[in-house]
Image (tube, grey):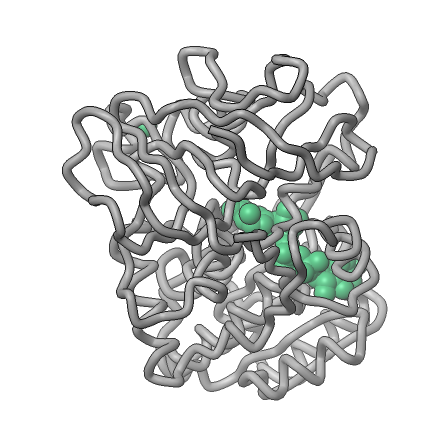
Amino acid sequence: MKTTAAVLRAGNGPFTVETLEVGEPGPHEVLVRVVAAGMCHTDLLSRELPPEFFGGPQVYGHEGAGVVEAVGAGIGSVAVGDHVVLSFNSCGSCPACAKRRLPYCFNFSLHNMSGGRPDGTSAFSDATGARVGSHYFGQSSFANHTVVAESSVVKVDRSAPLTKMGPLGCGIQTGAGAILNTLKVESGSSVVITGAGALGLSAVMAAKVAGAGTIIAVDRHESRLELASRFGATHTVSGSPESITASIMQTTGHGADYAFDTTGNAAIVRASHAALNVIGTIALAGVGFGDLTVDFLSMISGRTITGVMEGDSYPHEFIPHLASLNAQGKFPYDELITEFPLEAINDAEAASASGKVIKPVLVMPS
Ligand SMILES: NC(=O)c1ccc[n+]([C@@H]2O[C@H](COP(=O)([O-])OP(=O)(O)OC[C@H]3O[C@@H](n4cnc5c(N)ncnc54)[C@H](O)[C@@H]3O)[C@@H](O)[C@H]2O)c1
Ligand SMILES: [Zn+2]
Ligand SMILES: [Zn+2]
């Protein structure tokens, strides 16, 4: 069938909205009518990489929400008409998947970033019949219709508006999960969150849900720090790395129990790592490039540095949990959303890059 989708044809080029042919769902796949899809920074990673890393024309998007329109062979978990949030994919059979640690699937790249299905085929082709990459994070949801791996599909309650559900599939579950699943922040503890964007502000909300006593948000934009205060930060900080460390130490005394980085900036990571107490842990989600160096002895004393993917989420349980917290008014992540029609995808990117918009959500034509 024909569908409308945003295609990225060059790593640093604009998205072009085109009519594509989308194939039938194969075994263990479903065809989803996407209602809306969030834009995450990871969709734009090709802007930061050398051109040779660009794998060819592709449909990005990995925070989709929509309705199941058709199912392929062997589908048992969802049926036509179900409302679904689309999340990352995993192989289901490696040692990490066996431990339910799906974001750390040993075959993550093959199932999420190879430009198609693991067998090398793609679900999309353009008006000339040429291949367009699909299955980005198992879904490629900057499209009105897309073919999705069953393991990326999470069934959700029909009562929630689908225009706000997509971001639960990546950015929001990563921020909240870093606090609730990775760091397991306890009631009364102190937590530093560097970067108050989509991930950082979800983390602030989750730290409040966890009952953290001290929540310190760090950003370079005053407007973002104001939002952090509104959503639960008890303190806000901006300035040089040295002043960030000093301010956290002054607020916490012995240093912070936990830190979560979403900036991907090595100097900012070092600044909050230096302000952990000796048994403190920092979790890194922001994507950085090159080396990250920290003081050797500061690690021997007992501190922990860990990476975090997708908030250590088991999406089929964590996404409904976050949706339920949202319905109870305890996790208002939807206040971070600004909607754009799919045709305005390049404006959505610009508004996000300028800091004006925290979480753009692209609403599909029909
Ligand atoms: N690990 C994962 O699973 C995962 C999942 C989703 C996104 N990400 C990555 O997380 C990062 C954050 O994503 P986001 O959607 O929250 O982005 P965002 O742009 O909405 O937020 C980043 C924030 O960090 C602030 N910031 C950046 N550098 C800073 C500095 N030097 N000093 C102070 N503040 C600084 C920015 O002002 C911004 O508010 C991106 O790198 C993204 O690719 C990782
Ligand atoms: Zn993402
Ligand atoms: Zn796996």
Answer with the quarter of the image where residue 262 lies: bottom right
- Confirm whether residue 174 shows in the render: yes
Query: Is residue 92 left or right of 341 when viewed as pictured?
Result: left
Answer with the quarter of the image where residue 187 lies: bottom left
Q: Position of residue 342 (x, y in %)?
A: 65, 51
Q: Position of residue 266 (x, y in %)?
A: 73, 49
Q: Position of residue 320 (x, y in %)?
A: 29, 63
* Relative depth, front residue between 36 and 113: 36
Q: Residue at x 58, y 73 (%)?
A: 255
Query: Is residue 95 left or right of 253 when viewed as pictured?
Result: left
Answer with the quarter of the image where residue 149 lies: top left
Q: Residue at x 21, y 44 (%)?
A: 78
Q: Residue at x 74, y 75 (%)?
A: 246
- Confirm whether residue 299 shows in the render: no
Q: Residue at x 56, y 83 (%)?
A: 231
Depicted 110 relative to depicted 341: above or below: above
Callout count:
0
Q: Position of residue 224 (x, y in %)?
A: 72, 76
Depicted 106 relative to depicted 278: above or below: above
* Relative depth, front residue between 53 and 255: 53
Depicted 285 relative to depicted 29: above or below: below
Query: Is residue 108 left or right of 67 when viewed as pictured?
Result: right
